[in-house]
Image (cartoon, helix red, strand yellow):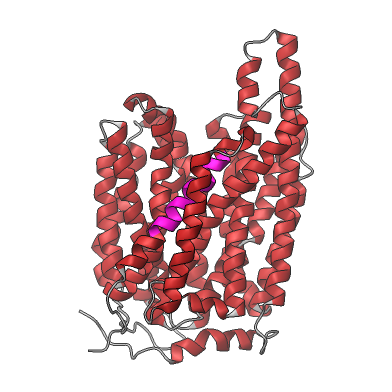
Amino acid sequence: MTPGTTPDATPGTTSTRARLGLAVLMLPTLIVALDTTALLLALPRLSADLGASNVQQLWISDGYGFMVAGLVITMGTLGDRLGRRRLLLTGAGAFAALSVVAALATGPLMLIAVRALLGVAGAALAPSTLALITNLFREERERGRAIALWAACQFAGGALGPVLAGFLLQHFWWGSVFLAAVPPMAVVLLAGPFLLPEFRGERSGRLDLTSVGLSLAAMLLMIYGVKQLAVAGTEGVRALPAAALFVGAAVGAVFVRRQLRLDVPLLDLRLLRDRPFLAVLVSLVLAGVAMAGTGLMVTQYLQSVLGYSPVASALLFAPMGIAVAAGTMTAPVLARHLPRTTAIAGGLAVSALGGLLLAAVDGQGSLPLAVAGISVLALGTGPLFALGTGLVMGSVAPERAGSVASMSETGNYLGGSLGFALLGVLAAVVYRDRTGGTSDSLAGAVAEAGHLPADQGAELLRTARAAFTASLHVTGVVAAALFAALAVLVLVLRPGTASGTASGAKAEAQAPEAQAPEAVPMA
């Protein structure tokens, strides 16, 4: 039997089963994103109940993201070889069970271990959802809309995570934040076998365990390194995270060399020779850098400069995720009237404007401008995440969609980690310079001001808040420059043939599908 997928509709139509299948795929997409950010508000309470130290709190918070980022490459390829629906359902079952265990954790070490295992399950879900969309929707326009909905769920979930956590913590105990994932995963387990097609590539072959180990080690070491260097801030480069970053880069180089030599690699890096493909992946990483860096600064600005509570700050910050979702939803409409590369570049130019708005934020009356700036910045990335992801997924035959989906997801996670580290360090340098080296952080200044006489404390806070606002301005300008450069990159590396027409883009997306294996149901 030729591996393939069950056809659900004739070309140019979308069946009810496909639409329901998309709704099922949106659930794990939403939950994986929610679980990444929901713990931000729950961490203080659960740490107090479990007696977690500062280091343990760091691992409770970061262990999940580390494992997702480290294993997403492996899981994407594994789904292509073992079956995408099988991997999705396995991940959903594991995620539900582990969420219950996490909610009932009796100690910090137990929760750290469970969070890491949740990351493994999350890594199985992330690329499977995107790859299965390519099986459900074979017609380009319908696939584009489906990917836009998928991207909207991903970013809306990240923005709504703290809001949901704040609501649950007001009415229940901290474990409810984990239990919120169980009902959606149960729906996936019950409906998935009936609504989702199974798909396994023809060239399954053996899974190269050496490549798996190399990719996991490289991602974990590099993400750990950049996160810890960001924590170090202006205190100087710490030996351990610097060494981790160096070793991770070296292991990554070995991984790349091995993939280029294998006949059936874990990750087909030869795809990077395609100019539009390369431009989109670079844009995903650097856009992630700009979004994560500015998002980090705005959340701190809302709390420490404008004085809002964590819950209120989460609500005020939610427009960023909602704006990304809105941008992704409108992207297919733009694609009807503009070439995809033009729509992506135009969106990135809008994001650059949002960065400049952040550079103008100042004073207690700046809340509307801060929210508008981060929302405009996020809105402009919508075409990149929707159309760019669609361009990447349409550049290969369906049997390789899982591997390509993992490249897209890896770009997102790597960009976010680099954004927290690089722009976080830049902001810390600006802050320290503006305070004359007398303060290392705004949080530290706020704490110190409480122990000083009223006049001295007020002066310290005024200086610290002005310095932090200056660091926000620099971050906004850097983000604007990154987005502007990416807009130029996307236009320069657009397809050389038929680059200015939608038909040219359509030909690119449909070409691999013509070489796909015949669609045959799988048991």
319 with respect to 200 (left or right): right
Quick check: is 291 in the magenta stretch? no
Residue 307 visible (yes or no): no
Residue 26 or 341: which is nearer the viewer? Answer: 341
Name above or below for residue 519 compared with residue 320. Answer: below
* Image quadrant occupied by the C terminus: bottom left
99 with respect to 275 (left or right): left
Residue 266 or 374: which is nearer the viewer? Answer: 266
* Image quadrant occupied by the N terminus: bottom left
Residue at the top extreme, as displayed: 453
Residue 84 visible (yes or no): yes
Residue under the image location 60 percent in, 66 percent down: 282
Q: Position of residue 364 (x, y in %)?
A: 74, 30
The residue segment tinted magenta is 216-230
What type of secondary structure mainly makes up the magenta span? helix
Name above or below for residue 484 compared with residue 174. Answer: below
Residue under the image location 32 percent in, 32 percent down: 108
Q: Based on the displayed image, in which of its 4 quarters is residue 264 positioned? A: bottom left
Q: Position of residue 342 (x, y in %)?
A: 70, 75
Residue under the image location 47 percent in, 47 percent down: 224
